[in-house]
């Protein structure tokens, strides 16, 4: 044997060995020298580490494992993708790798190493970890916004972040409106509203979806700075002293400017017909025209090549629609014609039998006077333009000049009868041309029924038409609240106001009394609901207008009043919703502006608040200019008085007072029926009927007498003679307030012996008393049969000091035997022989 292994030794201790040879006889040699030393060592590798676990972190991987059990374990090696990246001392059970690449897969294993350098096999299988990115990018700086047409361009400084993916643009509500991939740092936002400020912020976003804090906000207002396209298709038509320009539309234009010889001549909205008429141009002079398009931002298109045109000088067209009718006085003929077709007509020449008798500038009618009475004449009209060019003559119209005209004419033939109720169905303009009257008479060819209807009479043209035609099947007993209504008319004859239960507009569903205004100009019903709030319709439960009842009230229709221009209508209503804060629970007088639709309460105190005086009606009047309204009102425990309201200043004045010696004037009670009050055009004078005795205002007659009150001086002047046997009512004042009109059955003049209701006029300056309802020869009208009833009270409409319309049952002309209330036009300036004058 030449080798041997010693076992069971202690590692790392040095042992010395020598050899001795021994023979078969047991002899032993000397020990070998020198002795050989040997030190045992550990050559056994540690156990493979166990329990290796990996968790991904922010650009990191965190490893943990079980502790090793080898007593001589000296270290643990960490392998990353097979490469030792860390050597950790024994006892360590965790380690974190940092600075790793996000999204990359890393494989980790462990190797145990003992104190003798023995290394275990690598742990298997390796643990895979994919590092995360949990850190947001830095905030975006330097954001700048630049406006454009319906757009905005944003730019900013780049953000340094190795994982940066891009940017988001958010609006003021935090909504993402754009995304931009890195490294771009600009974006253009479109489809924005011009001239509307918008605010944006920019946010940086990395590949892991981490978002930075938003940038500082930046505001921008998009603005259209791109001009429209050049206008094309411009054409110029040469007209009479004018040019008509037309062109093709431009897509984004909102208005077009027509420039004549370098000067703006017209602006035409894009939604209207694309044409402009340039007038009052000198004929024969060439003009240059350019049309420019302007968009909503005010950008103006470039100019096209100018287009030229030369205005011409053409004579006007011959007047059409010429009408000639006899006037109300001898030698008078009223001539009217249609408006001229050309705008440059400055006057019309009216020729009678070939002779020029009138030059009429700026109008389409004229009253010819001084013509040969009884002659049949031929009338033609010629139009003349600004250059003096005359049109051809109109068609010839023949008319017989009146030779004898009575001082009054019945508006409706007495053989037919008007049937006008007290205060109802009668209105007229102050010039007497336009009259509305309720009558069953058939005044137009299409009227085939027997029912009373409202007729609009044009006394200048001699025409009539029904305002609210009824079916042919209606008989005389049929009633209709529209045709039986009290009416008022504007001074130009265009507007008519009335009250009716008929539902004339879709918003009116209540079948109750409501007030309407009718536009008569076109002949079509163009109705505006008067008795309704500015934003609302008819009430479902409360009538829009009120017809009060009571002692001495005979009106069959609510009283209405209208300003001369027809813009404002006054009415009495119990509706509580016409104006805000109407909580008095009683009827009030209201005024509605039909131009704006606004309603205001008239029956208020001088400061606009509540007043103890409550409006009663139905009497209601307004001055033509709309400054003053007068109406009856009453406070608890006080007389029913007449008040005057100043609609501009708000002043509320008790008008019905009587002087009392050495003391304050006394309020006196008045009658309140329609027609029982009147006011002069300037609001200074009022007329009323009262039973109070003027000399002792606290005592009363048994009947009401009529007076005119001067609200400046306080003077109270009687319209009658002081008689107390019969009521004086149905009052009127001429526009100046000098003349007062009154109706009574009492004989205010000794000659008046018919014992019927007559109308009188009192000159309150001279005291002269004149019988209005005398016959054509000046005599007192004969009495009719039966007793005096309210049906015969009639009504007087004062057109002027001398001209009135009067309703009466008295037969003022031969042939009037119908016993009905007929309406006559009376000219008191004409004094016939035997005229009854006091």
Image (spheres, rainbow, N blue to C red):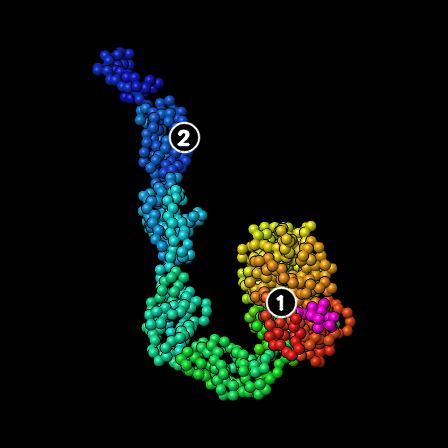
* Residue sitting at x 34%, y 30%: 77
How many C-alpha atoms fall within 10 Å of the one at disc 2: few (<14), some, or many (≥20)? some
Residue that mark 1 sits on: 767
Q: Is residue 753 magenta?
A: yes
* Residue at position x 33%, y 44% in the image: 141
Quarter holding the N terminus is top left
| Label 2 – label 1 distance at C-alpha | 132 Å
- Magenta extent: 746-762
Q: What residue is pinned by disc 2?
A: 65
Q: Picture coordinates of residue 295 (x, y %)? A: 39, 63
Q: Residue 599: x, y in percent?
A: 58, 58
- 203 part of magenta stretch: no
> Do we see residue 446 in this rendering?
no
Give the quadrant of the C terminus: bottom right
Q: Residue 135: tell me if it is visible.
A: yes
Label number found at residue 584: none
State the residue in front, 319 or 100: 319
What residue is rendered at 40% in x and 24% in y? 69
Q: Position of residue 20 (x, y in %)?
A: 26, 14
Residue 143 on image: x %, y %: 34, 47
Q: Which residue, as the protein is rendered here, is positioned at the far right?
A: 786
């Amino acid at each position: 044997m030449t080798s041997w292994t010693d076992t069971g030794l202690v590692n790392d201790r040095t042992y010395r060995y020598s050899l001795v040879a021994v023979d078969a006889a047991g002899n032993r040699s000397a020990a070998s020298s020198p002795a050989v030393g040997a030190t045992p060592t550990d050559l056994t590798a540690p156990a493979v580490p166990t329990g290796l676990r990996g968790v991904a972190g922010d650009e990191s991987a965190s490893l943990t494992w079980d502790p090793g059990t080898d007593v001589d374990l000296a270290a643990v090696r960490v392998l990353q993708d097979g490469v030792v990246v860390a050597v950790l001392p024994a006892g360590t059970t965790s380690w974190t790798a940092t600075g790793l690449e996000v999204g990359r897969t890393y494989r980790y294993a462990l190797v145990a190493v003992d104190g003798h350098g023995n290394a275990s096999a690598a742990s298997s299988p390796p643990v895979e970890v994919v590092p995360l990115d949990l850190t947001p990018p830095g905030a975006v700086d330097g954001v700048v916004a630049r406006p454009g047409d319906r757009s905005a361009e944003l730019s900013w400084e780049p953000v340094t972040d190795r994982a940066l993916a891009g940017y988001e643009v958010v609006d003021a509500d935090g909504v993402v409106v754009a995304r931009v991939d890195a490294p771009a740092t600009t974006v253009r936002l479109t489809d924005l509203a011009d001239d509307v400020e918008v605010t944006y912020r920019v946010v940086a976003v990395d590949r892991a979806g981490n978002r930075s804090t938003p940038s500082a906000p930046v505001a921008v207002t998009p603005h259209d700075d791109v001009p429209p396209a050049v206008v094309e298709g411009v054409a110029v038509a040469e007209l009479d002293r004018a040019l008509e320009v037309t062109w093709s539309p431009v897509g984004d234009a909102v208005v077009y400017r027509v420039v004549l010889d370098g000067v703006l001549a017209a602006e035409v909205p894009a939604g209207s017909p694309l044409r402009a008429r340039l007038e009052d141009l000198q004929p024969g002079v060439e003009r240059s025209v350019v049309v420019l398009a302007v968009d909503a931002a005010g950008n103006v298109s470039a100019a096209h090549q100018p287009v030229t045109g030369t205005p011409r000088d053409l004579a006007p067209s011959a007047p059409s629609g010429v009408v000639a009718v006899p006037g109300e006085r001898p030698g008078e003929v009223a001539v009217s014609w249609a408006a001229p077709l050309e705008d440059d007509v400055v006057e019309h020449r009216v020729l009678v039998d070939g002779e020029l008798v009138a030059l009429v500038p700026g109008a389409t009618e004229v009253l010819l006077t001084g013509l040969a009475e009884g002659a049949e004449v031929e009338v033609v009209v010629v139009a003349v333009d600004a250059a003096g060019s005359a049109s051809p003559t109109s068609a010839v119209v023949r008319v017989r000049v009146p030779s004898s005209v009575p001082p009054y004419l019945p508006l409706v033939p007495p053989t037919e009868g008007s049937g006008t109720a007290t205060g109802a169905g009668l209105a007229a303009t102050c010039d007497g041309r336009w009259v509305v009257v309720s009558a069953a008479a058939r005044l137009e060819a299409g009227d085939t029924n027997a029912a009373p209807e409202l007729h609009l009479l044009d006394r200048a043209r001699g025409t009539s038409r029904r305002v609210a035609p009824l079916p042919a099947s209606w008989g005389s007993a049929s009633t209709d609240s529209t045709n039986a209504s009290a009416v008022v008319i504007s001074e130009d004859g265009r507007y008519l106001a009335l009250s009716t239960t008929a539902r004339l507009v879709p918003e009116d569903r209540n079948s109750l009394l409501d007030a309407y205004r009718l536009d008569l100009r076109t002949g079509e019903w163009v109705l505006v609901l008067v008795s309704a709030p500015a934003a609302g319709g008819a009430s479902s439960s409360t009538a829009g207008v009120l017809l009060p009842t009571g002692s001495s009230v005979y009106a069959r229709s609510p009283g209405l009043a209208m300003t001369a221009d027809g813009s404002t209508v006054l009415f009495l209503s119990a509706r509580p919703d016409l104006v805000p804060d109407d909580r008095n629970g009683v009827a009030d007088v209201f005024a509605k502006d039909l131009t704006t639709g606004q309603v205001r309460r008239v029956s208020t105190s001088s400061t606009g608040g509540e007043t103890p005086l409550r409006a009663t009606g139905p009497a209601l009047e307004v001055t033509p200019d709309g400054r003053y309204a007068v109406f009856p009102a009453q406070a608890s425990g006080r007389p029913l008085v007449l008040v005057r309201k100043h609609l501009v200043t708000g002043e509320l004045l008790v008008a019905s007072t009587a002087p009392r010696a050495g003391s304050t004037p006394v309020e006196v009670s008045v009658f309140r029926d329609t027609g029982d009050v009147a006011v002069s055009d300037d609001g200074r004078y009022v007329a009323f009927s009262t039973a109070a005795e003027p000399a002792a205002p606290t005592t009363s007659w048994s009947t009401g007498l009529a007076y005119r009150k001067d609200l400046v001086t306080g003077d109270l002047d009687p319209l009658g003679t002081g008689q107390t046997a019969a009521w004086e009512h149905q009052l009127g004042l001429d526009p100046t307030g000098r003349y007062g009109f009154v109706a009574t059955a009492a004989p205010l003049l000794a000659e008046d012996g018919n014992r019927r209701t007559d109308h009188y006029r009192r000159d309150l300056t001279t005291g002269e008393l004149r019988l209005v309802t005398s016959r054509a020869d000046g005599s007192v009208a004969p009495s009719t049969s039966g007793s005096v009833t309210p049906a015969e009270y009639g009504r007087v409409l004062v057109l002027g000091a001398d001209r009135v319309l009067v309703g009466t049952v008295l037969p003022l002309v031969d042939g009037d035997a119908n016993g009905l209330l007929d309406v006559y036009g009376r000219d008191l300036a004409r004094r016939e022989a035997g005229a009854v004058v006091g």
